[in-house]
Image (tube, grey):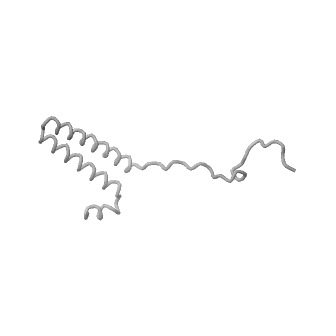
Amino acid sequence: MEPQLTLFVTGADTGSSPPRRRRRVGRAERMAQRIDDLASRAEREAEECRLAGDAVGERKAREQARDARRSAQILRAGPGGVAALMAA
């Protein structure tokens, strides 16, 4: 005989799994994201310098952006992937 009232439904009854927790972002990934943000700012600065006709400032900002992107790549590669990244 079927129950007339169901007070609660368990996960086994519905066939669904419990919600997954969001993966916690590690310290290296957070730092890599901050460095990417710095690179984006440097690229905007380079564009502003280009529009202003400041070739030296543009070059400096582009170098900062390039170096920041490279640093973020190294952080994301981790200890095992740095050698392969440096060889590329």
**Which of the 4 image quarters holds residue 4?**
top right
| x, y percent for residue 33 | 35, 46
At x 28% / y 50%, what residue is drawn?
69
| x, y percent for residue 27 | 39, 48
At x 35% / y 54%, what residue is drawn?
76
| x, y percent for residue 29 | 38, 50
Tell which residue pokes out farthest to the front in this image. 51
**Most foreground residue, 9 or 86:** 9
**Most foreground residue, 8 or 54:** 54
At x 31% / y 46%, what residue is drawn?
36
Q: Tell me: residue 19, above or below residue 84.
A: above
Marks counted in the figure total 0
| x, y percent for residue 75 | 33, 54
**Most foreground residue, 30 or 43:** 43
Q: What quarter of the picture does the C terminus occupy? A: bottom left
**Which of the 4 image quarters holds residue 83?**
bottom left
Tell which residue pokes out farthest to the top in this image. 52
In the figure, is residue 11 to the left or right of 32? right
